[in-house]
């Protein structure tokens, strides 16, 4: 088979929505076990070892920036190529200083509700769209699943922090026995929750870059992509302080100033 081949399988069912995750804790608990199983799976041989692999978050952002760089004149205000490169570099440097979130897992890479299906036949949970699967941060997958306000057309209902907490607890309940260690209790739960929240700004940054990249691929709908990019960038600016060395989250996850 060609290395560029994508395998498809038809599944009868429905994709989940943001509201499903916000209103039905039981769905999240079922997803948590399956995601933990993915994250604790061995890396396929096509990838480098977890110790040396490049996180897909950054390799995909870099690939999109390279494409944007070929047609920088297509960028809408207030964006510029220098601005994007600088902000992505700063965000990565900040994340790299957080010792508590550097372990890579086999991640999904685009783990939003619409990439989770409930099968019609038996109600099974199925993950779809593994195009960005590979070495990545577990916190990125988890936060993106629960992130709210992915549309700019209406005011979303608030994110359910209680459901996220229950999700992380279920995720750890599966992960730790599989790894052969005793449950970490409250301290382990709180540590992973803090790690997950640290990735909120990065989910928005990645999304903003994606929609700006989309303009280069589909200029006919540039206005639509630009509106989405601006919304994601606004959300990134509102949350990026979480990556600051002086933020409570960064301090607790081991960030130190160079």
Image (spheres, grey):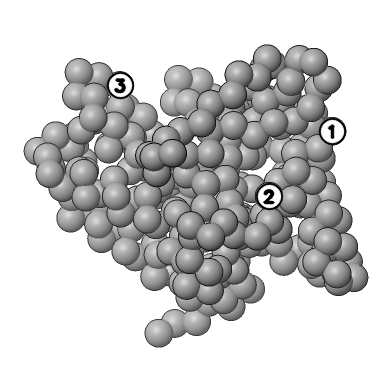
Q: Earlier in the sequence, mark 3 or mark 1?
A: 1
Placement of 134 over or under 244, stated as above or below: above
Q: Which residue is mark 2?
A: 38
| Most foreground residue, 247 or 87 | 87
Are the two marked residues, 2 and 3, in contact with CB atoms closer than 8 angstroms?
no
Q: Is residue 172 left or right of residue 62?
A: right
Q: Residue at x 45, y 20 (%)?
A: 153
Quadrant in the rendering for residue 185? bottom right
Quarter of the rendering occupied by the C terminus: bottom left
Nearest to the eye among marks 2 and 3: give it: 2
Q: CA distance from mark 2 to mark 1?
A: 19 Å
Residue 32: x, y in percent? 76, 44
Which residue is located at x 24 percent, y 24 percent? 218
Residue 189: assigned label: none
Any part of residue 33 in sight? yes
Confirm whether residue 246 shows in the render.
no
Q: Secondary structure at mark 2?
A: helix
Q: Do the residues bearing badges 3 and 1 touch, measured as CB atoms within 8 Å? A: no
Q: Return the residue nearer the eye: 145 or 77.
A: 145
Mark 2, Cα crowd under 10 Å, few <14 / some 14-19 / many 20+, is some
Residue at (49, 60) in percent of width and height: 47
Disc 3 to disc 1, C-alpha distance: 35 Å
Write down the residue under mark 3. Answer: 224
Marks 2 and 1: CB-CB under 8 Å?
A: no
Q: Choose between 247 and 172: the one closer to the eye.
A: 172
* Label annotation for residue 26: 1
Q: What secondary structure is marked by label 1?
A: helix
Asked whether 39 or 113 is in front, the reply is 39
Q: Disc 3 on helix, strand or loop? A: helix
């Amino acid at each position: 088979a060609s290395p560029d081949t994508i395998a498809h399988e038809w599944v009868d069912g429905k994709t989940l929505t943001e509201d499903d995750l916000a209103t039905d804790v039981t769905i999240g608990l079922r997803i948590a076990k399956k995601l933990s199983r993915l994250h604790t799976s061995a890396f396929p041989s096509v990838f480098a070892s977890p110790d040396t692999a490049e996180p897909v978050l950054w390799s995909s952002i870099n690939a999109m920036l390279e494409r944007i760089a070929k047609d920088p004149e297509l960028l809408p205000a207030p964006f510029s190529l220098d601005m994007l490169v600088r902000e992505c570099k700063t965000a990565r440097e900040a994340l790299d200083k957080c010792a508590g979130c550097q372990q890579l897992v086999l991640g999904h890479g685009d783990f939003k509700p619409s990439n989770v299906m409930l099968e019609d036949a038996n109600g099974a949970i199925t993950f779809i769209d593994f195009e960005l699967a590979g070495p990545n941060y577990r916190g990125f997958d988890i936060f993106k699943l629960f992130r709210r306000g992915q549309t700019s057309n209406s005011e979303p209902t608030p994110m359910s922090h209680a459901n996220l907490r229950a999700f992380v607890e279920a995720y750890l309940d599966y992960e730790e026995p599989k790894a052969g260690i005793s449950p970490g209790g409250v301290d382990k739960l709180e540590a992973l929750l803090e790690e997950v929240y640290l990735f909120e700004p990065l989910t928005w940054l990645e999304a903003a870059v994606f929609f700006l990249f989309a303009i280069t691929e589909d200029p006919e709908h540039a206005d639509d992509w630009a509106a989405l990019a601006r919304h994601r960038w606004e959300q990134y600016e509102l949350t990026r302080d979480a990556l600051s060395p002086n933020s409570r989250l960064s301090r607790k996850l081991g960030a130190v100033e160079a």
